Amino acid sequence: MPLHLGHEKSDERPLPVNPFFGEANPVARMVEAPPKHRLPTTPMPPTTAYQLVHDELMLDGNARLNLATFVTTWMEPEAGVLIDECLDKNMIDKDEYPRTAELERRCVAMLASLWNANPAAAVGCSTTGSSEACMLAGMALKRRWMRRNTDRYPAEDVRPNLVMGINVQVCWEKFCNYWEVEARQVPMEGDRFHIDPQAAADLCDENTIGVVGILGSTFDGSYEPIADLCTALDDLQERTGLDIPVHVDGASGAMIAPFLDQDLVWDFRLPRVASINTSGHKYGLVYPGVGWALWRDKEALPEELVFHVNYLGGDMPTFALNFSRPGAQVAAQYYVFLRLGREGFRLVQQSTRDVARGLAERIEALGDFRLLSRGDELPVFAFTTAPHVQAYDVFDISRRLRENGWLVPAYTFPPNRKDLSVLRVVCRNGFSVDLAELFVEDLSRLLPELRRQQQPATHDRGAATSFHH
């Protein structure tokens, strides 16, 4: 929902519309463009409306060249056809669209198996993305804590808190704000760019509803040590009796690690992990927007948060913040699961990681940059300028790459590493070896000119990039 009404400019638009756009309006004779900020007085032909909107959207960036986003920008044509066929189906009407509801149920069961939960015991649902899934997981954590502390809460001097690294996605800060939970964040230190397990455990007390671990961080693509985090909380329970659950924000990594890092223990194999979320529209390989939230069992998801609808004469539990939304992306997710299977996912994700690692090595070999990560966990890597580079900074690089169509975010890390500014490259399915080669060529062509600068052109880092973490 926009928080403004558009630019405060005159709504008079005497500019002509190209008559070739559609049938000529016998009254206006196609000599006047439609208004921008109020409804036109009369209808126009569909071809004209389409062309006007189409032409304006041409000024957007090319999604395939957007190396900032984690969101899927390419799917097979068959998936596109399936999405078109399901756009008019409202996911919430499970009794009217029972097969769509069944596909959602199957996807939840597949993810439960993938994340080593008991499919018969695990509960879950689709969401519009990981942000909604995180809100649901946070609500469940808070409600479980409230159940255990009915003798103390609510009270003026008792405020629940949630422990997390400062590198969390902004949705967790939103959750804490919206649901009146104190956010306790572990800062970055030195070359540690994500949560420290012991530091997280030290922030916990009797008012802690849970700890969030990230698989992996959007800042540099690294996995947080979920098993070590659980061990630190196990030790805390032995010393204090505090039993703190863990939620794994696997927005990206929960669809990478099961296929490429099978020996990594991060999921429901850890008894302390109560819930996991992922973004189907990221490395789940589906167009936006679809996410998934799963809980270990019914104990992890308080019953009072679940609503029940009649489904084919039976009971279909539902738990979501949003009501009406299309079933298209759920159908597309089921299509991808069927289409690829475990082996197909492994091949696709391995290919993406190979592109990321190869590109990181090529950039390091240029000599002007220092890698913070190498794309060997998430297919994502961050890099900054080498110490000897004084003529330009990462913001200059980001700005100049945009001239060639590449959207590469440059940003400053949070406390206590605000001194560190980086570029980050996200490799996704569809970002091929050939595109990576073109990227390196364009970056290499920029360097001689940037090296000749007297100093970085950036005067205001806050305004230097349109990307803000």
Image (spheres, rainbow, N blue to C red):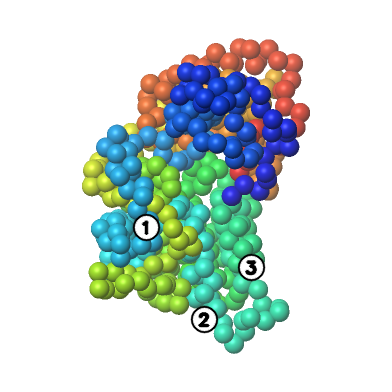
Residue 448 vs 190, above or below: the answer is: above
Which residue is depicted at the point 37% across and 24% down?
433
Report the front residue among 390 and 213: 213
Nearer the observer: mark 2 or 1; the answer is 1
Residue 456 visible from this viewpoint: yes
Q: As shown in the figure, which amino acid type bears the numbered disc 3?
A: Glu
CB-based contact (under 8 Å), mark 3 and mark 2: no
Badge 1 marks a residue whose secondary structure is loop
| Distance from the alpha carbon under mark 3 to that under mark 1 | 30 Å
Badge 2 marks a residue whose secondary structure is helix
Badge 3 marks a residue whose secondary structure is loop
CB-based contact (under 8 Å), mark 3 and mark 1: no
Which residue is depicted at the point 61% across and 72% down?
160
**Residue 112 coordinates in the image, percent (x, y):** 31, 60
Q: Label 1 belongs to which residue?
A: 91
Q: Label 2 belongs to which residue?
A: 147
**Residue 429 coordinates in the image, percent (x, y):** 37, 35
Which residue is depicted at the point 49% across and 57% down?
132
Which residue is depicted at the point 37% across and 73% down?
308
Report the front residue among 67 and 349: 67
Q: Label 3 belongs to which residue?
A: 180
